[in-house]
Amino acid sequence: MTSQHQHTPGADQIRRAPKVLLHDHLDGGLRPGTIVDLARETGYQHLPETDPDKLGVWFREAADSGSLERYLETFAHTCAVMQTREALVRVAAECAEDLAEDGVVYAEVRYAPEQHLEAGLTLEEVVEAVNEGFREGERRARESGHRIRVGALLTAMRHAARALEIAELANRYRDVGVVGFDIAGAEAGFPPTRHLDAFEYLKRENNHFTIHAGEAFGLPSIWQALQWCGADRLGHGVRIIDDIQVGGDGSVKLGRLASYVRDKRIPLELCPSSNLQTGAADSYGEHPIGLLRRLHFRATVNTDNRLMSGTSMSREFEHLVDAFGYSLDDMQWFTVNAMKSAFIPFDERLAMINDVIKPGYAELKSEWLFQQTASTSGSAVEER
Ligand SMILES: O=c1[nH]cnc2c1ncn2[C@@H]1O[C@H](CO)[C@@H](O)[C@H]1O
Ligand SMILES: [Zn+2]
């Protein structure tokens, strides 16, 4: 007999299941209505649509180009309305609320402080405003019966030259809301080694960082991120698939780099919907996450940009459940992988796994028992 938790969870169970999110951009997750409000309040006149529903559709379609560069152009509008303290507090608070509402219990949300200085804020003021917003969002979530913890990752833009400065900022705000560092932006032509000074600084400070690598560009980018820069995790890393050969008979051969990634348990921050939009995969069913999960890579599921992809953690899991028939056990596996890979201290990660994630899944997995009892009690009587 197979128990219910080995079967596919429905949308409601997926939403209620505790989820952990490691790769989500603050400026890629605004509510369309908030963008419209903020544009009005700050006098930004270049929004392509002013009706929230139409604006949401515009972002999804504009980001759906098959090219990372075109995808990134849409961030001009979100960053444009995130230039004041009030705007940053609001966006961060709503981000935490929306994630909590979706069943996310722990999230690391990233943004590039250097992109929020146009109206005169300092880097420090940007970080403090976002931290304030996250704390406010956690508080509001608690009031509506949800529990979430949000940490910030500070991103430096790979085409710019402020990585060391941003790394120092991340180090200064360590233990006060910021849990690590990242680099993002167009990948081709901007190798991570351009920012070696920032990574070396963070290593000397025993700090943590992830690097967007292996999304729009392949193995050399992943190799540099790990072996030159020393990344703790890979943002996407999906192209590691190029170093894995699957034979006609189903046999699998890992190259040296793919072996290293798996053997060292390097976390892959996979973002299926985002990859479909930027052309890194053609369909959910063909997304490398299926193979990577089967081969026991440290794979995690992430949203990247909820606005541009019209997604949420629950939506990402729904797509994967549809494509691969994943069960609650698979969801728990991805979630525990993500929590193990978080940048908060080990004892806190362990407590999240043992005291929040496992009990949450156990609760969901036990639901079928009670449903079954109710529906079979009647028929058992009839059979006599
Ligand atoms: O998937 C991605 N790959 C590379 N860069 C990205 C991705 N999503 C967002 N950003 C970039 O990161 C900045 C800070 O959040 C965003 O403004 C966007 O330019
Ligand atoms: Zn990203």
Image (spheres, grey):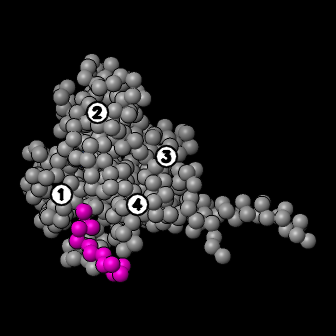
Q: Secondary structure at mark 3?
A: loop
Which residue is identified by label 2? 78
Looking at the picture, how far across and down is residue 163, in whole percent?
13, 48
Mark before the other along the chain sequence, 4 or 3: 3
Asked if the magenta segment contains residue 236, the reply would be no
Q: Amino acid at mark 1?
A: Phe
In this rendering, the answer to whether 35 lies above or below 174 is above
Q: Nearer the viewer, residue 146 or 60?
A: 60
CB under 8 Å between callouts 2 and 3?
no
Q: Nearer the viewer, mark 1 or mark 3?
A: 1
Which residue is identified by label 1? 217
In this rendering, the answer to whether 365 lies above or below 195 is below
Q: Residue at x 49, y 64 (%)?
A: 326
Q: CA distance from mark 1 to mark 2?
A: 25 Å
Q: Amino acid at mark 3?
A: Asp
Q: Amino acid at mark 2?
A: Thr
Q: CA distance from mark 4 to mark 2?
A: 31 Å
The reply to whether the residue tagged 1 has its Cβ within 8 angstroms of ligand 1 is: no
Mark before the other along the chain sequence, 1 or 3: 3
The magenta span reads 239-252
Q: Nearer the viewer, mark 4 or mark 2?
A: 4
Answer few, some or many: residues within 10 Å of disc 2's Cα (few below 14, many 20 plus, some between 14 and 19).
Answer: many
Q: Amino acid at mark 4?
A: Gly
CB under 8 Å between callouts 1 and 3?
no
Q: Nearer the viewer, residue 27 or 189?
A: 189
Q: Residue at x 50, y 63 (%)?
A: 325
Mark before the other along the chain sequence, 4 or 2: 2
Q: CA distance from mark 2 to mark 3?
A: 22 Å
Asked if the magenta segment contains residue 240, the reply would be yes
